[in-house]
Amino acid sequence: MESYDAIVIGAGVIGSSVAYHLARFGARNVLVLDRTQIGAGTTSQSSGILRTHYSVMENVEMAKASWSIFNDFSGYLDDEEASAGLVKCGYLVCAPEGSKLEPLRSALAGQQAQGIEVRLLDQAQARELLPIAKFDDAALIGYEPEAGFADAYMVATGFARAARRKGVKIMEGVNVERLLVEGGKVVGVETSRGTFHSNTVVSTQNIWAKDIERWTGVASPVVPERHAVLALEGPEAYSFQMPVFKDLGSPGMLYCRSYGGNQMLVSEGTVGETLAQPDNEQGDISLDYIVDVGAQVAERFPSYETAGLASSWTGVYDVTPDWNPVLGRLPEVQGLVVGYGFSGHGFKLSPAVGRVLAQEALGLATDVPLAPYSIERFRNGRLLTGKYGLGAVS
């Protein structure tokens, strides 16, 4: 039975980040196990938007820490060939009069309090940045210039390559079948390729995190939820120079960004389709959904009333009751550290999450406090519920 300082389950963007940081912080013998390939699961379905805008201030701190790494990805990894595929186009968010107005005002002030550059714009200034949109109903508009989008798959493979250079062993096509626990302590994992020993296991299994409950008996409050993404081709290009946009005034709290430098990537930031079992295969997108989202887009982008559907796909979120992740140790199982339930914003937080989970696994002080993200919050009622309602912005 092979023995390791730490075993990481999952080689998506979170697991790859954890593995790299374990080695960076001194772990000499780390094993990563993935059921398929590096970054091939839910990571590959990410819309890739990067922002520090959240109504949950703990997330702002985590996103801010992540942004500093995204902004110098190759330098951070000491790999001149590494790239996050970063497009720094800014992030624009607006709300009309109504229930979203004061939450937005509070969130923008919270960002500013943490030293993040956020500007308040009038309607004319917003149109200069995003001339294909109209802002006639916008009562409050915020703009985060140091934001944009990147490529989640490139980030995952960049972390994985850097981890391997530091001696991490990554095994693809290996299914973890059981967590081995003796006397309440982790001693290893049983897999489709044999048994591996370690007193430290970090699970980054996202939509498959219910395995933790099956292995340990500890309830894992996470469900898989499918969301659809559309790429629209309109008469006016949504260029790379135009900011990512969050429309809190639309029924679906739409988010959109440039796709391919010409098309619009768009999806709703609301509750999706709950799946009975984890499944990240492509799902069906109904014509009714496409028509509904298209109508919402046309309300904000008038010329897109005649837009065509260029492509579409689905992605699956690992969703918790408050739409925020569970991070840290499970009190009932010594040696087990978890990171799951990212609810659509795992990529945005992945560099910082990888750091803090690695620090926690190695018994180091964490850059960002993990107590608010503890599984205990679902037992004591101290949830991290966002002020915009359930959805991907929290």
Image (tube, rainbow, N blue to C red):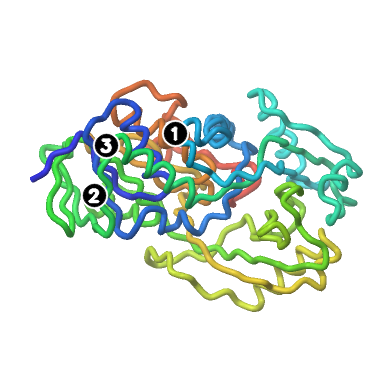
Furthest residue toward left: 1
Kindly indicate the quadrant of the structure image that contains residue 26: top left
Q: Nearer the viewer, residue 25 or 91?
A: 25
Quickly name the residue at label 1: 77
Circles 2 and 1: CB atoms closer than 8 Å: no
Where residue 149 sits in the image (x, y, percent)?
62, 47
Q: Which mark is residue 291?
A: none
Residue receiving disc 3: 167
**Residue 334 seen anywhere in this rendered image of the structure:** no
**Amino acid on which disc 1 is placed:** Leu
Question: Horizontal placement of 14 versus 385: left or right?
Answer: left
Q: Amino acid at mark 3?
A: Gly
Q: Position of residue 342 (x, y in %)?
A: 47, 47
Residue at the spot x=40%, y=31% of the render? 356
Nearer the viewer's eye, disc 3 or disc 2?
Answer: 3
- Which residue carries the number 2 mark? 217
Q: Residue at left 65%, top 78%?
A: 287
Mark 1 / mark 3, whichever is N-terminal: 1
For the residue marked with disc 2, what is the amino acid? Gly
Q: Quadrant of the C terminus?
A: top right
